[in-house]
Image (cartoon, rainbow, N blue to C red):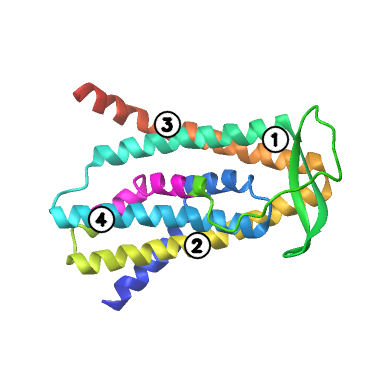
Amino acid sequence: MLYIFVIGFLLGLRHALDADHLAAVASLATRSRSTSETVRTGIAWGLGHTITLFVVCAVVLAMDIGFPEQLASIAEFIVGLMLIALGGDVIRRAIAKKMHLHGHSHDEDGYHLHLHSHSKDAPHDEVAHSHRHPRGLPTRALMVGLMHGLAGSAALLLLAVTEHGDMLTALIYVALFGAGSMIGMAILSFTIALPLRASARYAKWSFNGFNAAIGLATVVFGILIVFETAPSIAGILGNG
């Protein structure tokens, strides 16, 4: 039995590397102002993803019903639209705002590099840089993770779990899978933060270019998902 749980955890680590997850978290990470905030973004995504998986699996098992494939298709389609919106927002911010990096200090944080932006035509005031450093989990990333929990291979996981084992075993498996995805996404987010911070250090144009590339890749991947799931959505609407 133990090996099943170990496999669940390892599959969760691997699940964090799915292309749509990478695209979503990379686009969300462009809003982060520090490496720690980027890591919290990944953890928030993983938490939302785990909550959806656990709740849906518990409901499916408790009610002894099958997981509707139509729901997975709809969720995947929405994820595609969501990626297009996230990527488009990254591109918009890269073009419309002057992103740059400078150093300053806070009593509680000490000296650190701070990434921020001004509108294209606004003057740069070196003194007026008052800002807060949020400590909690980013709500936007949490919501994106909640939606991802219903889509793609996560739905296939629910289908597999509900067909094997008792309810307690299935829920432990899902919880460990979710824990693996959270840890995997935290590590992945830290990895994403490195080139983001590096590009910001060299020049404003390199950082904005890197952000625009992330946004464009996210939009393209979202379009691909929409086109892949569009026939299923059309079939659902036609039957309805």
Q: Amino acid at mark 4?
A: Cys
Q: What residue is shown with label 2? A: 184
Mark 3 or 2, nearer chain start: 2
- Label 2 and label 4: CA atoms lie apart by 21 Å
Q: Main secondary structure of the magenta part?
A: helix
Is 176 left or right of 122, judged from the image as shown? Answer: left
Please name the residue that numbered disc 3 is placed on.
226
Q: Nearer the viewer, residue 5 or 146?
A: 146
Q: Residue at x 24, y 64 (%)?
A: 170
Residue that numbered label 4 is attached to: 57
Q: Please tell me which of labels 4 and 1 falls first in the chain.
A: 4
Please state the horizontal and vertical placement of residue 136, each as a whole percent of the image.
55, 57
User: Badge 3: few (under 14), some or many (20 or more) residues near its Cα, within 10 Å?
Assistant: many
Q: Alpha-carbon distance for marks 4 and 1?
A: 39 Å
Tag nearer the camera, 3 or 4: 4
Instruction: Please give left or right for residue 170 compared with residue 200 in the image.
Output: left
Q: Is residue 228 left or right of residue 117?
A: left
Q: Position of residue 216 (x, y in %)?
A: 61, 35
Q: In the rendered structure, which disc, 3 or 4, sits on the residue that comes first in sequence?
A: 4
Q: Which residue is mark 1?
A: 94
Q: Is residue 147 left or right of residue 206?
A: left
* Residue 220 visible to an observer of this rendering: no
Q: Residue at x 73, y 38 (%)?
A: 209
> At 46% across and 45% down in the image, what residue appears?
144
